Amino acid sequence: MALLSRRDRTRAELQSRLQPYAESEEELGALLDGLAESGLLSDRRFVEARTHALERRFGASEVRRRLHGSGASAELIDQAVAQMESTELARARAIWARRFGEPPEDPLERARQQRFLRTRGFSFEVIRRVVRGTEDE
């Protein structure tokens, strides 16, 4: 219960954390099933919470990459990322404004700003529009 009280976890993550302490696979499976039935363990809730936490700092592709390693199902991850993509441009602009705040004055600065946004997981089209200051189409 201490593992779940700190933050939500996926079934796969919790299973790997509890595996060394379980007497048998059946016992661990029964425990995880009971937690899921009581609503204490939910992959959907984990994906939603983790997506919400990550979307303030990262683009859709980086969020997808980080969620993929969590053990959540690809279907849940795809749904969460699809919802994020509608706000990708606004989020990229907010992140860019916090870091830079003004358009680049030369090609080197433009490349630096583009690289920053790329490492945050934003698409090339979004990066181009943010750095050049292109308005919504």
Image (cartoon, rainbow, N blue to C red):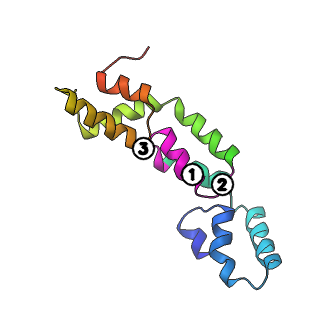
From this viewpoint, is residue 102 visible?
no
Q: Which residue is mark 1?
A: 67
Magenta residues span 53-73
Question: Is 136 part of what is drawn in magenta?
Answer: no
Mark 3 against mark 1, which lies toward the viewer? 1
Question: Is 60 part of what is drawn in magenta?
Answer: yes
Where does residue 21 sit, x and y in percent of width and height?
A: 67, 84
What element does badge 2 sit on?
loop
Q: In this rendering, is residue 15 above or below 80? A: below
Tell which circle, 1 or 2, labels the residue nearer the N-terminal end: 1
Snapshot quadrant of residue 112 = top left
Q: In this rendering, is residue 12 above or below 26? A: above
Q: Which residue is mark 2?
A: 72
Snapshot quadrant of residue 11 = bottom right
Under mark 1, the amino acid is Leu
Q: Name the residue at 61% across, 62% down.
A: 9
Where does residue 25 sit, x and y in percent of width and height?
A: 79, 77
Under mark 2, the amino acid is Ala
Snapshot quadrant of residue 121 = top left
What element does badge 3 sit on?
loop
Q: Which residue is mark 3?
A: 56
In this view of the protein, which residue sits in the foreground, 121 or 84? 121
Q: Name the residue at 30% across, 27% down.
A: 131
Tell which circle, 3 or 1, labels the residue nearer the N-terminal end: 3
Q: In this rendering, is residue 5 above or below 57? A: below
> Could you give the CA–CA distance between mark 1 and mark 2, rounded to whole angstroms?
7 Å
Q: In this rendering, is residue 101 above or below 25? A: above
Where does residue 103 sit, x and y in percent of width and height?
A: 22, 26
Mark 2 against mark 3, which lies toward the viewer? 2
Tags 1 and 2 touching, CB below 8 Å: yes
In this view of the protein, which residue sits in the foreground, 110 or 84? 110
Q: Name the residue at 65% across, 39% down.
A: 79
